Image (cartoon, rainbow, N blue to C red):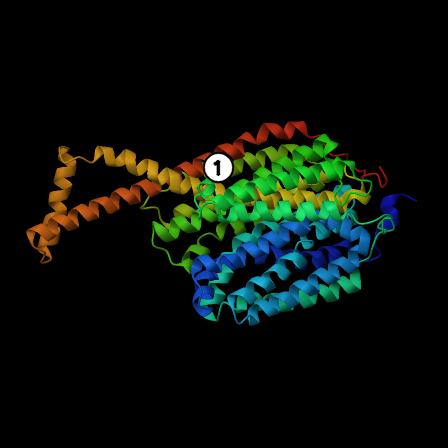
Amino acid sequence: MSDRETIRPAINPWIIAITVMLSTFMEVLDTSIVNVSLPHIAGSLSATVTEATWVLTSYLVANAIVLPITGWLGNHFGRKRLLITAVSGFTIASLLCGLAPTLPALVLFRVLQGAFGGSLQPISQAVLLETFPPEERGKAMGFWGIGIVVAPILGPTLGGWLTYAYSWRWVFYINLPIGIASVIMTTLFLFDPPYIKRQEGGVDFWGLGMLAVGIAALQIMLDKGQEADWFGAHYIVLLFAVAMIALIAFVIRELTARHPIVHLRVFTNRTYATGVFLMTLLGFVLYGSLVLLPIFLQTLLNYTAVAAGIWTAPRGIGSLIFMPVCGILLGKRWDSRGLLIFGLILGSLALFAFSRFTLVSGPWDFFWPQFLQGAGMAFVFVPLTTVTMDPIPNAEMGNATALFNLMRNIGGSVGIAFVTTLLARRQQFHQVRLGADLTMSAPNVHQMLLAMQQRFMAHGADLVTAGQRALAALYALLQQQAYLLSFVDNFWLLAVVFLAMAPLVLLMRKPRAGRGPIAGH
């Protein structure tokens, strides 16, 4: 009997897909739903907004530490037991977050939430890839990808609505019914395949410690770097040094340890290594663009947080429509690498369209480029996951999906840090460049100032006050234009990165039609 026949469940695999989808959607949603609630959390708990950002940082750090060891945890405790424990812990931690009386308590509960949630994405992805035969994995990944791609896009919209309509605490309470349903379905329908068994040998505590220290230092550095002016702050330099030393030591340790906690030799497979690199860049572009557009809408076009959330939803609509379409095409044996290149081109075209936004762009100017980007993400995420995981043995699937998801998250953290830094630096650059052209000797500048001065005088200001206000208004326009150009630079650069990913797809081997990964090799 083949490995595929041995592990095929007696129940409909789509029931298993729905089961793991619930936990995945809940966890991914939580990475973005809290963002718009930070000012309300800070005000409610008597803290500054800067202090409240630790609510985000603490979650991401704990999540990132647990992600890469998910494969080991699944083998050590069993996947079903791990998934039930993770979902239960995440749900209880969500309740505690909603009840938190102080900011330190909320940060502590977010650490617990992130730690329990870290294993949900890779374990659910591994279960899906094992449950479905190779020819149906595209459909399964299309369904699962809805949670991964759509949830962080819908998060700000849902979070803004819950915060304004009820309270920021409901941002956490919303996880309770989803978590309970997920635990019940996991208990009823999930099982451990026969090759998942507890490995003999001790726990690699040295490797685990190096990983925890390295990932924590890296995540905090990326999250707080722009706020602290990067390497202008001594603690950022220290965090960078600690992260590099710990992670390099971790890699050496895992390649030489008798019982490594993370199997890094999976990167010797060219297709998998290329896929992980592409997923890292995808995280960079996706999360970077997700951060930029709401800021653009709120700071330059004066949208409210709720309105900005609503008008960033078309990305989710595009992904929701085309994820299943992409899965069906893969099921019909379309070359997944061709679909992946097509998705990268669509995504880059959407970002080039973003770079043409102006201060008079309307809501529908944002709708279609975002819809196109959502479609592009569907044609990127589903084929990329399918191709990358095709050569991975089932017994190594948990380890491979853990590293795959970790690098997407790290890429996202780097992308967010990069675009926010570039936004600030390019605004300064354009402000200096535009300011050099604003001289009183320029006829158009002189005429503009006179027109502004006369307008202020028409509203009751004296000559001196009107002149001062005119200069202030002109400087505000200068800052606004500089800020707009910095957004244009960011979107254009992200579009180039996305387009440059396309040739790398050719390094990946075409998936083996009709054959699954070999169980033990």
Residue 378, position as x, y percentages in the image = 59, 44
Choose top left, top right, bottom left or bottom right for residue 307.
Answer: bottom left
Residue topped by disc 1: 494
Provide the secondary structure element on which disc 1 rests: helix
> Residue 64 or 365: which is nearer the viewer?
64
Can I make out residue 356 in this image?
Answer: no
Query: Which quadrant holds the N terminus?
Result: top right
Query: Which quadrant holds the C terminus?
Result: top right
Residue 239, position as x, y percentages in the image = 55, 44
81 vs 283, left or right, is right
Name the outermost residue toward the left: 463
> Residue 408 or 6: which is nearer the viewer?
408
Q: Residue at x 65, y 68 (%)?
A: 92
Q: Residue at x 60, y 54 (%)?
A: 28
Choose top left, top right, bottom left or bottom right for residue 137.
Answer: top right
> Residue 240 or 447: which is nearer the viewer?
240
> Residue 342 or 53: which is nearer the viewer?
53
How many numbered marks does the figure carry? 1
Q: Residue at x 11, y 57 (%)?
A: 459
Can I make out residue 179 in this image?
Answer: yes
Q: Residues within 10 Å of mark 1 (few under 14, many from 20)?
A: many
Kind of residue at badge 1: Leu
Residue 69, position as x, y percentages in the image = 72, 48
167 vs 113, left or right, is left
Residue 233, position as x, y percentages in the image = 46, 44
